[in-house]
């Protein structure tokens, strides 16, 4: 079955923990919108958006539900993101440092400069070997003589083979400098685990990432209605307390006004355990058996995979020459990996014209079982940094 949201409208498919998609009135895609229209807690941690559409730089901004923070995959064109959205970032995952995946680091750096001293934890960048030096070089390219303390710094994790990694602290000190630190010096992450591997992309490596949410809790809407309680921000607080194994008294709006409850009492009645969700990001890899095998290990079982699908299968020679993947290579990985939903990205500009676009979209639609296709860039509300379509 092909499931396609209204093309070009950036409607979101259901969150990863929603039940298997069903069609309504026998028409494909309608459930996609109704699924996303379901608001409030319980749709899983990851709320990703492909920023620049099918043909733009592959950038995924992923809000972490109920946590007021976000992660970013790749630093190509970040134009749609205002500083407020960048300030929410806890992690930036960088596949590799080709221009279309790294050039907007400057926008990130500038956002950090306006946010100095306000970060609760430093921004962590993760990417292939050599990333720390490249981040330091970018910082080094500016003059900083007018800068006062506090100074920005980044933590960098370099993915090595075999799930190993090296850690660095990149500081602004006579320009940019990278210092090796221990893995134990990185802040711990309580909400998800990172899986990554390095894929061959010509004579450089491109990192493929997956984030696996740790077991989590959902709110039971029927229990909420049964107790006469109204949903609101307090549910975020309740989930946060549960995640951190804490309790406190909460003021909860109900049909009869407001009532005070101990969070531990509410937890027992309202929350139900659910398996964590998983998202994955795979781009700029040549199609080899070795790459397919390694990518599968990382993306297997993902609820939502954002995957490069750069060329039509008939142009596979071109894909080979440029070290990119065809639609059919992406579809093979999604199928073999049991991925629930795929968003293709990084399509070659040669297919953006009217005639070839139709052929390209048709091949996408007939290659993936469950497809969430975003042809157009996303729009953000300028003041709130909220996505508006
Ligand atoms: Zn690229
Ligand atoms: Zn590349």
Image: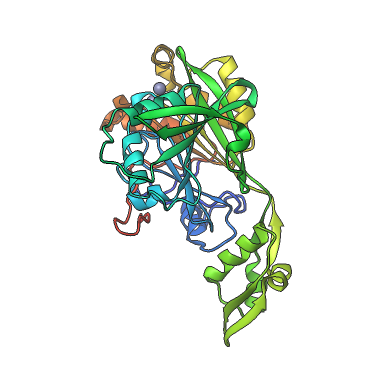
Q: Going by the image, does 309 lie left or right of 46? A: left
Of residue 370 and residue 79, the one placed in the foreground of this image is 79
Point 61% across, 75% down: residue = 250
Q: From this view, report whether residue 227 is shown above or below residue 34.
A: below
Residue 90: image x %, image y %?
49, 45
Q: Going by the image, does 50 lie left or right of 232? A: left
Rendered-image quarter of ligand 2: top left
Rendered image quadrant of residue 50: top left
Q: Going by the image, does 113 lie left or right of 229? A: left
Of residue 232 and residue 241, the one placed in the foreground of this image is 241
Residue 169: image x %, image y %?
49, 33
Q: From this view, report whether residue 333 is shown above or below residue 318.
A: below
The answer, for residue 59, to whether it is visible in the render is yes
Of residue 346 and residue 109, the one placed in the foreground of this image is 109
Q: How is the image coloured?
A: rainbow
Quarter of the picture holding the N terminus: top right
Rendered image quadrant of residue 361: top left
Which residue lies most toward the bottom here?
Answer: 256
The answer, for residue 299, to whether it is visible in the render is no
Residue 371: image x %, image y %?
49, 40
Q: From this view, report whether residue 191 is shown above or below residue 133.
A: below
Rendered image quadrant of residue 389: bottom left
Residue 152: image x %, image y %?
39, 41
Of residue 366 and residue 282, the one placed in the foreground of this image is 282
| Count of numbered circles on the image | 0
């Amino acid at each position: 079955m092909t499931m396609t949201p209204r093309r070009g409208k950036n409607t979101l498919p259901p969150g990863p923990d929603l039940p298997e998609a069903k069609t309504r009135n026998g028409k494909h895609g309608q459930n996609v919108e109704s699924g996303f229209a379901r608001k409030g807690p319980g749709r899983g941690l990851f709320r990703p958006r492909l920023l620049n559409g099918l043909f733009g730089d592959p950038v995924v901004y992923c809000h972490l539900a109920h946590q007021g923070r976000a992660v970013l995959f790749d630093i190509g064109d970040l134009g749609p993101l205002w500083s407020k959205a960048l300030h929410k970032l806890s992690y930036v995952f960088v596949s590799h440092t080709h221009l279309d995946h790294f050039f907007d680091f400057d926008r990130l750096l500038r956002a950090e400069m306006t946010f100095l001293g306000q970060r609760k934890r430093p921004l962590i960048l993760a990417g292939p070997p050599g990333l720390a030096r490249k981040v330091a070089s970018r910082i080094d390219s500016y003059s900083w003589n007018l800068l006062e303390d506090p100074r920005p710094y980044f933590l960098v994790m370099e993915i090595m083979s075999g799930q190993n990694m090296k850690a660095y602290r990149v500081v602004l000190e006579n320009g940019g400098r990278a210092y090796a630190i221990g893995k134990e010096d990185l802040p711990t992450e309580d909400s998800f685990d990172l899986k990554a591997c390095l894929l061959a992309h010509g004579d450089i490596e491109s990192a493929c990432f997956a984030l696996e949410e740790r077991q989590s809790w959902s709110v039971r809407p029927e229990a909420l209605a049964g107790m006469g309680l109204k949903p609101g921000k307090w549910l975020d607080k309740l989930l946060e307390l549960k995640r951190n194994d804490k309790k406190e008294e909460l003021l909860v709006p109900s049909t009869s006004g407001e009532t005070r409850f101990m969070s531990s009492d509410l937890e027992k009645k309202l929350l139900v355990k659910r398996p964590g969700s998983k998202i994955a990001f795979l781009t700029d890899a040549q199609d080899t058996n070795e790459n397919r095998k390694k990518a599968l290990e990382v993306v297997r079982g993902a609820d939502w995979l954002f995957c490069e699908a750069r060329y039509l299968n008939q142009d596979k020679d071109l894909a080979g020459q440029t070290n990119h993947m065809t639609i059919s290579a992406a579809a093979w990985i999604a199928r073999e990996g049991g991925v629930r939903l795929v968003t293709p990205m990084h399509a070659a500009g040669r297919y953006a014209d009217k005639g070839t676009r139709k052929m390209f979209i048709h091949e996408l639609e007939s290659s993936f079982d469950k497809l969430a296709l975003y042809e157009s860039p996303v729009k953000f509300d300028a003041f709130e940094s909220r996505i508006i379509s």
